[in-house]
Image (spheres, helix red, strand yellow):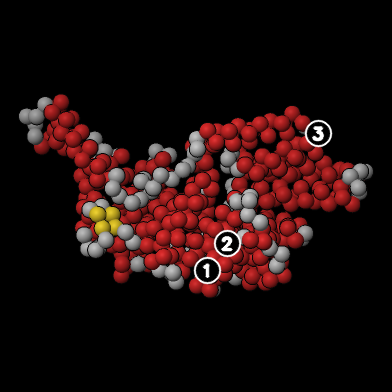
Amino acid sequence: MRCFIWILLAVPHLTKKTCLCFYSANADEVKDKLEQLRCHFTWELLIKDNEMSDLENRVLDEIDFLDIKYNVGIHNLLAYVKHLKGQNQEALVSLKEAEDLIQQEHSNQSDVRSLVTWSNYAWLYYHMGRLAEAQTYLDKVENTCKKSANHSCYGIECPQMDCEEGWALLKCGGKNYQRAKACFEKALEADPENPEFSTGYAITTYRLDGFNKDTKISEGFSLQPLKQAIRLNPEDVYIKALLALKLQDIGQEAEGEKYMEEALTNMSSQTYVFRYAAKFYRRKGSVEKALQLLKMALKATPSSAFLHHQIGLCYRAQMIQIKKVTKSQPRGQDRENVKRLVRLAISHFEFALEQKPTFEIVYIHLAGMYKEAGDHRKAEDAYQKLFRMKALEDSQL
């Protein structure tokens, strides 16, 4: 409303009703322009209210612990999440951090690289009722777009914009993955050898392999994109860890372990490497090594739903091993160890769901552990929560 108050002060003979009409018309005009922008406010990111806390934690973890070259976008996403939580002043701080990074990392092409950040500024100021400032950023976008041959007033067609949208969609969860893949594919059509585009595409296809239950593991689509990303980003340990897991998926565990060991010897992004290395070694049968890595990662990111789920899976694996050795009839200390491991697995699965209530696979694993504990009512409740979640998703298709 700052603009409305300015009108009253500047033109005192106008009635309040007239000023309101003028303000409303001006706001509508600004809104029409805003809707033409390409940014987090217009990309239709699918984020549920009960996913917001986990998303914010994952974004903050990435800023603190993932060593990547492409982190301007993550500050923009954090600004958008802050806005959704009603924290607009904090959102402005995140956008300022994005601006500073652009000047440090892309000073030779800062205007084009700033388009998403400026667009988010414009939307944010609009929601804060600061229309003059929103218009200032709209003007910045328009002036930059005019310099491009392929543009509208408030947007340009360029692979970097497609890439920015892809990263935002990728970070916001599984329902956005197909759209993220399309964005990175479009960017790669324009620049097939771009390391950032290749990285985004490889990560997205890896995630989709995990989602696509109809794809045979041996035909995992992400294998070649991951290898291409490594070729273009030979020092990227995050991609090496994902490639190691994919090779393990298709039965090439020895080759995968070479990549995982390379990733572990590098100090870069260790918190993230630990979590994927732990998954690799748990699946290999080295559960103690996996737990050791997970506990080191947990010191840095104690609220990670992913880590707590993986720790729960390790305790479940240890419980299954005891039952296997004792032919499902553990006695004495073995029986006590089974009970202890079931309790530990339950506590970590429950914590993971507190952090991320939409973490579907955890409901299945938790229900299984409730059954092991003899609590069939809780097991049924976990299944019912999952079924209701699935039914709600299907009804929204």
Compared to residue 298, the image places residue 128 above or below, namely above
Is residue 216 in view from this perspective?
Answer: yes
The label nearer to you, 3 versus 1, is 1
Q: Earlier in the sequence, mark 1 or mark 2?
A: 2
Q: Nearer the viewer, residue 381 or 355?
A: 381
Ranked by sequence position, the earlier of labels 2 and 3 is 2
Query: Which circle's residue, 3 or 1, is located before the other in the chain?
Result: 1
Q: Which of the two discs, 2 and 3, sits closer to the camera?
A: 2
Q: Distance of mark 1 from mark 2, alpha carbons?
A: 10 Å
Q: Amino acid at mark 2?
A: Ser
Residue 141 horizontal side relative to residue 46, left or right: left
Q: Residues within 10 Å of mark 3 (few under 14, many from 20)?
A: few
* Type of amino acid under label 3: Gly
Residue 229: numbered disc: 1
Vertical relation: 393 (above or below) 245: above
User: In percent of the image, x 72 and y 37: which residue is there?
Assistant: 367
Identify the residue position indicated by label 2 in the image: 222
Helix, strand or loop status at disc 1 = helix
Q: State left or right for residue 333 relative to residue 353.
A: right
Q: CA distance from mark 2 to mark 3?
A: 40 Å
Q: Residue at x 45, y 56 (%)?
A: 182
Number of disc labels = 3
* Label 3 sits on residue: 374
